[in-house]
Amino acid sequence: MGRSRATGKASRSLFIVAGVIIVIAIIAGVAIFTTRNAITAISGTTSVITTSTDPRLAFLTLNSSNPVLGSNNAPVTIFQFGDFQCTTCDYWFKTQESQVIHNLINSSEAKLVWRDFDYYGPDSTFASEAAYAAGEQGKFWQFYDTLYSNQQEANNGWASKTNLIGFAKSIGLNMAEFNQSFTSGKFDSLISANYKAGQSLGITGTPTFFLVGPKQQIVQIVGAQPASVFEQAVNSMIPSR
């Protein structure tokens, strides 16, 4: 009898173990099936997920501090990260920008947003502060044009505080208001935030552009690229074109 009870217990133990193994196998199978389905779902909508969760979008937001050229309703936003002492930025300004403005900005297909990325030195920061101060009187882009039109070798003094004040006078700003704003330090946080955003976006030189489309698509353009490159990017972002 003892031997028979032992055999029965062993059989029951084996049955239980087998049952546990079967349950585990079923659970594992369900998990694998679920995982495969999840992977299929993600890979099947990669473009959508990439577009909606692109981490760069966190640094490409438009707020009231950003100077904007063009219609706020334009479907594509062109974020320009630049330095007023950058010779490549100056070259793009003098050779390509007017075409971009004529073909894309004036047609309300895109708007241009300035974000300074000052890395040449203190005079770059002074230039940004002066431009923002001019912007308080509605003349940011006029001051922007003046800076690039008068650019010289970086850090040779052309963008000194004295010269920047002279530029402000030349475009007819209220000098009392300009001087108070220019020397207040009120734009320090904006300039710092723009620089940190540029670093987070991986910018290593200027100009660097990020085009954000109506479906949150992003196209990055580095350097003084031809206006046609911008037009092709905008065309790819607007389905009706």
Image: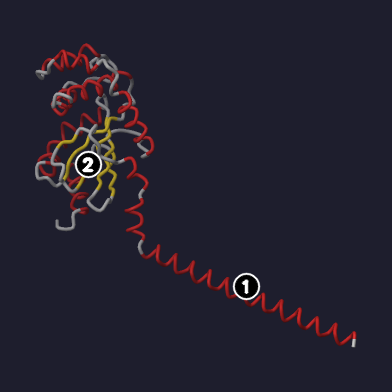
User: In the rendered view of the protein, which quadrant contains the N terminus?
Assistant: bottom right
Q: Can you say whether 43 is above or below 110 in the image?
A: below
Residue at the spot of label 2? 78
Residue 191 in percent (x, y) is at 31, 27
Name the amino acid, label 1. Answer: Ile
Q: Please state if 68 lies on the left or on the right of 21 as rendered.
A: left
Q: Earlier in the sequence, mark 2 or mark 1?
A: 1
Taking 208 as reference, is 37 above or below it? below
What is the secondary structure assignment of the residue under circle 1?
A: helix
Label number found at residue 241? none
Q: Residue at x 53, y 69 (%)?
A: 31
Which residue lies at the image location 10% right of the left edge and 20% below the top edge?
A: 171
- Residue at 14%, 24% (x, y): give it: 137
Task: Please name the residue that numbered disc 1 is placed on.
Answer: 24
Residue at the (13%, 27%) spot, across then down: 138
Direction from residue 8 to residue 62 in the image, left or right = left
In the rendered image, residue 77, in percent from the top left (x then y), is placed at: 21, 43
Q: CA distance from mark 2 to mark 1?
A: 54 Å
Q: How many marks?
A: 2
